[in-house]
Image (tube, rainbow, N blue to C red):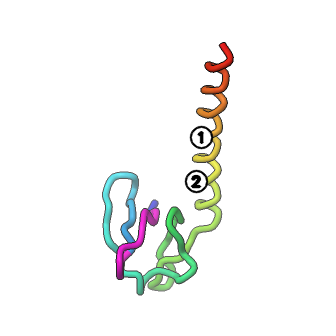
Amino acid sequence: MIIIDRFEEEFAVCEKDGEVFEKIPRSLISKSAAEGDVIVLSDGIYVTDKAKTEKRKKEISDKFYGLFNWQNLISII
């Protein structure tokens, strides 16, 4: 899985398979792609995989709210 971490000048710094960061030229990435998007190569250009991006964002959100609710529980006790 390739995830856009950030944009730096003419490159997107991407996390690949959760292990390695690599720079991909912005010219090879769809203009609609944003930081945090999961991207896939399609016809020579990286495009957002909307389903995987939404799934990933939901998983992160669920973890955040789980942590937030746990902290609230501790503060009540």
Q: Is residue 76 above or below residue 1?
A: above
Tag shown at residue 64: 1
Q: Is residue 42 left or right of residue 75?
A: left
Q: Does residue 10 appear left or right of residue 38 in this picture?
A: left
Label 2 sits on residue: 56
Q: Is residue 51 left or right of residue 30?
A: right
Residue depicted at 53% across the width and 83% down the height? 31
Q: Quadrant of the C terminus?
A: top right
Callout 2 amino acid:
Arg
Q: Residue at x 60, y 54 (%)?
A: 57
Of the pair 22 and 77, the residue shown nearer to us: 77
Three-letter code for the amino acid on which mark 1 is drawn = Phe
Q: Is residue 5 magenta?
A: yes
What's drawn in magenta, residue-wise? 3-11
What percent of the width, then of the height, locates residue 38? 52, 64
How busy is the neighbourhood of tag 1: few (under 14 within 10 Å), some, or many (20 plus)?
Answer: few
- Residue 43 placed where, x, y %? 49, 85
Decide: few, some or many residues near mark 2? Use Cα within 10 Å; few <14, some 14-19, many ≥20. some
Task: Relative to 62, say whether 3 is above or below.
Answer: below
| Alpha carbon separation for disc pair 1 and 2 | 12 Å
The one nearer the camera, 6 or 41, is: 6
Q: Is residue 24 magenta-colored? A: no
Q: Is residue 65 above or below residue 46?
A: above
Under circle 2, the secondary element is helix
Residue farthest top in this picture: 77
Q: In front here: 72 or 4?
A: 72
The tag earlier along the polypeptide, 1 or 2, is 2
Determine whether the residue tagged by mark 1 lies in a helix, strand or loop. Answer: helix
